[in-house]
Amino acid sequence: MKRLLPVLSHLFAAALGFAAGIYLLPILTAPPAPSSTDVTAAASRAEFTGEFRRDLKDSDLLHWGEGTVSVGRTAIALAGKVAPGPDYKLYLSPEFVETEADFHRLKPAMARVGDVKTFENFIVPVPGNIDPAAFNTVIVWCESFGQFITAAQYR
């Protein structure tokens, strides 16, 4: 038993370090966030706005977003924050989504816009083949872990 305790403590420390690395690496490697001026400029060209809220069904302590999201033909901008994490993708959906089950059900009808690389403010260019007016909800999704982060209905 005395030999098992150090092994267990080392395994626990390694697991804790690995989990902390997964959480901290995206924060440490994130590019600088766009300035408030850049976000305001992108928002001024937007056709729609919505709100990311922390109180969605599948949002929790580690998976959330808050702030105003502006949706335009050329860019989607957030004046606010999302919980840090790896491999965030921005999607547009034809229906409001606030759970992982809803996301998976509607994913075939969604359009993947691009990568979210910053956690305070972001601007994601909209590809020319996507018409945001054909959708009504913007979603942040963690692709690596299949985790719902946040969503906002904008129409």
Image (tube, helix red, strand yellow):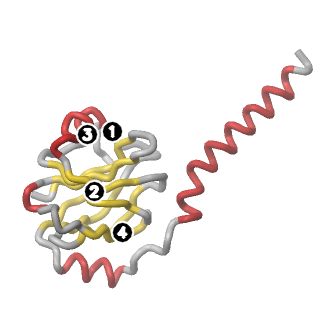
Q: Residues within 10 Å of mark 2 (few under 14, many from 20)?
A: many
Q: Secondary structure at mark 2?
A: strand
Q: Mark 4: which amino acid? A: Phe
Residue 30's place in the image compared with 150, above or below, is below
Q: Are marks 4 and 2 in contact (CB under 8 Å)?
A: no
Q: Secondary structure at mark 4?
A: strand
The residue sitting at the front extreme is 129
Q: Mark 2: which amino acid? A: Phe
* Closer-to-camera residue (60/140): 140
Q: Are marks 2 and 1 in contact (CB under 8 Å)?
A: no
Residue 110's place in the image compared with 121, above or below, is above
Residue identifier under label 3? 103
Residue identifier under label 1? 58
The residue sitting at the right extreme is 2
Earlier residue among tags 4 and 3: 3
- Circle 3 or circle 2, nearest the eye: 3
Residue identifier under label 2? 52
136 vs 85, left or right, is: left
Earlier residue among tags 1 and 3: 1
